[in-house]
Amino acid sequence: MSTAPAPSTRAPARRVIAVLVLVPVLTALALWAFAWPAARTAPRDLPLGVAGPAAATAQVEKQLQQHDGAFEIHRYDDEAAARDAIEDRSVYGAVVVTPQGPELLTASAASPVVAQLLQQAVAQQAATRGAQVRTVDVVAAPAKDPRGAALNASALPLALAGIVAGAVVTLLGLRGIRAALALVGSAALVGLVAAALAHSWLGVLTGDWWAEAATLGLSTLAVSAAVTGAAALIGPAGTGLMAFVVMFLGNPFSGAASAPQMLPEPVGVIGQWLPPGAGTTLLRSVSFFDGAAVTGPALTLTWWAALGLGAVLLGNATEARARSAEPAADREPALAGRPADRTTG
């Protein structure tokens, strides 16, 4: 007669099976999230300007449109208008038709990868007509970080700092206002330290120091508040969920290494809705473009931070109500067990 295995032997077996299943699944997800966008990097509706008289720019526009879906053409009357559009972050570059030949305006500070791609595309087209292209970098990347490697690398440490801060606040058992103050304080310190390193020491950021520190701190707070808020509402699983969203989706979908328009659709759009992508875009605008086009990414980070802090306070209030209801529930059985008072006539 066979006997069923004891529960003590079934539990470890289930854990082993869970590990054997989860590790390959997480590995596959990580490879998909990081490798797929990198392998499919190409321009998709990349904003590009064309400046000059309509009759002179018609051929340039026609040639650019041959790159099916690669460029979103914006037309400008002259070079000054095209330069303003680049500095406002409306376009990544512009082809200016002049009597001396075509001129390419780029902004390597917006994306060195895009600037190089535009140089190759425009030079190739000009070569078919036997013309030479003069390139002008309107908003150049810092001399100490010409390829944008340091700024691109900042997305991951800021995401990790936010995840760690949120996890530590949760593990220490901080609740409500104390948790919110700890999150805001730690994010502010991260912003100050990061600005000191990236701006003052490395020299890879060149904008207003305090604006950069505020951007770095807000990027960290958006992640840490989301992690802590999710944990306050749904428990420890919330920490893992938000860490997955930030690390496996936010970082590879951020477009920090190239540009959102260089990623497969809808990855580029999704990345700008998440803290790493919004934070990188905001940091570029603050550091290199005098705060141009900051509204969208700033609002995105603010919403993440506000919703996360709101979830922290809501979770604490829900827990407090649950605790206050427990004594009343404990008293009810005792009251029900008492004999009813009787009166004799």
Image (spheres, rainbow, N blue to C red):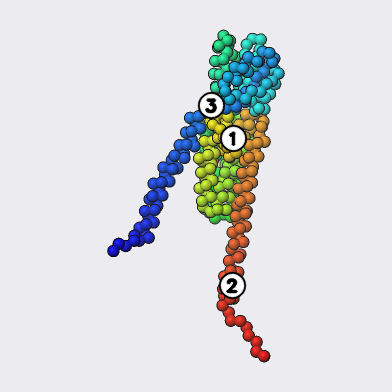
**Is label 1 in a helix, a strand or a loop?**
helix
Q: Looking at the picture, how far across and down is residue 49, in whole percent? A: 64, 22
Which residue appears at 67% of the width and 18% of the height? 51
Q: Nearer the viewer, residue 213 or 109?
A: 109
Reply above or below: 80 against 180.
Answer: above
Residue underneath mark 3: 42
The C terminus lies in quadrant: bottom right
Identity of the amino acid at label 1? Answer: Val
Q: Is residue 191 visible?
A: no
User: What is the three-letter code of the residue carrying label 3?
Assistant: Ala
- Mark identifier at residue 332: 2
Disc 2 residue type (three-letter): Glu
- Image spot of residue 213 (x, y percent): 61, 38
Of residues 172 and 11, which is closer to you in this image?
11
- 286 sits left or right of 246 in the view: right
Residue where numbered disc 1 is placed:
269
Q: Earlier in the sequence, mark 2 or mark 1?
A: 1
10 Å crowding of disc 1: few (<14), some (14-19), many (20+): some
Q: Quadrant of the N terminus?
A: bottom left
Query: Could you tell which of marks 1 and 3 lies nearer the N-terminus?
Result: 3
Residue at 54% x, 31% y is 263
- Classify 208 as above or below 77: below
89 relative to 258 in the view: left or right: right
Q: Image height check: is 106 above or below 301?
A: above
Q: Judging from the image, what secondary structure is the residue with disc 2 in? A: helix
